[in-house]
Image: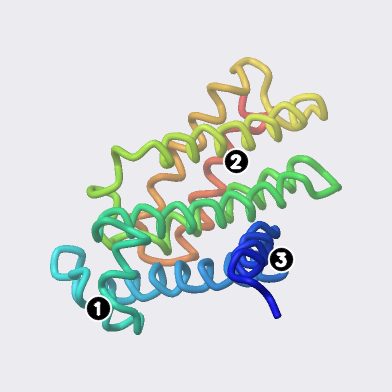
Amino acid sequence: MYTSMQSVLLIVKVYDLPVPRLWSETIAAHRREVGDAILDTTAALVSRHGIRAVTMSQIAEETGIGRATLYKYYPDVEAILVAWHERVISGHLEQLAALRGQPGNPLERLEALLGTYALIRHEHHGTGLEALLHRHEHLAHAQRRLSELIRELIVECVKAGEVRKDVSPEELATYCLHALGAAVSLRSRTAVQRLVRVTLDGLHSRAR
């Protein structure tokens, strides 16, 4: 039989062991699932009721977790919306970067990237999030990354003789972003496609 001291030493040794990797991965996966559920639920509530009407209690109830658990993840509704928006923006950037990295004609890839970006702007607006989140750094970072993706493709197009050389790639990338920002106010995808064509016409080497 173990003495009291042996029992204490055994307990100490058990708790001194590293946490099994599978357990750690399971806990991390569970946290990600709960975190995603919180973001998805909040986005759905905002879509139905508007930003100002959503409360932490509603989010907890709809997600199926306690308020105390919710507050372990996020301190308030705005923090949840920022995290949700960061996830959305990251997904868009991944999509656009994939278009940038495809093989083939650089002008066709530029057209695909600009067209996709314009449609994203057209289809993801009007939620009021812009006014709430405009000051957050992730938007500025995303804008810089997007500008860089466009600039890189323009450089390739210039080398291929497809895009004008009298304006720097940096300025042309900025021009594209501002021009395609008008997609938010257009009424149809067809109008968005026309906007993209007009923008590309301004870039083309023959436009000089």
Q: Any mark on residue 20, and which?
A: 3
Residue 128 in the figure: left or right of residue 165: left
Picture quadrant where residue 56 is located? bottom left
Q: Is residue 107 left or right of residue 4?
A: right
Q: Nearer the viewer, residue 154 or 7?
A: 7
Residue occupying the point 66% across, 52% down: 112
- Residue at the disc numbered 1: 48
Judging depth in this view, the residue of 198 and 123 nearest the camera is 123
* Number of the front mark, 1 or 3: 3
Residue 128 in the image, given as x and y percentages of width and height: 24, 57
Residues at marks 1 and 3, CA–CA distance in whole angstroms: 42 Å
Indicate the secondary structure of the residue bearing disc 1: helix
Q: Residue beneath label 2, please?
A: 200
Neighbor class of circle 3 (other Cα within 10 Å; few <14, some 14-19, many 20+) is: few
- Left or right of 67 on screen, residue 19: right
Q: Are marks 3 and 2 in contact (CB under 8 Å)?
A: no
Of the numbered discs 1 and 3, the one sitting upstream in the chain is 3
Amino acid bearing label 1: Arg
CA gap between label 1 and label 2 equals 37 Å
Quarter of the figure that contains the N terminus:
bottom right
Where does the image place residue 116, in percent across and percent down from the top left?
A: 58, 56
The tag earlier along the polypeptide, 1 or 2, is 1
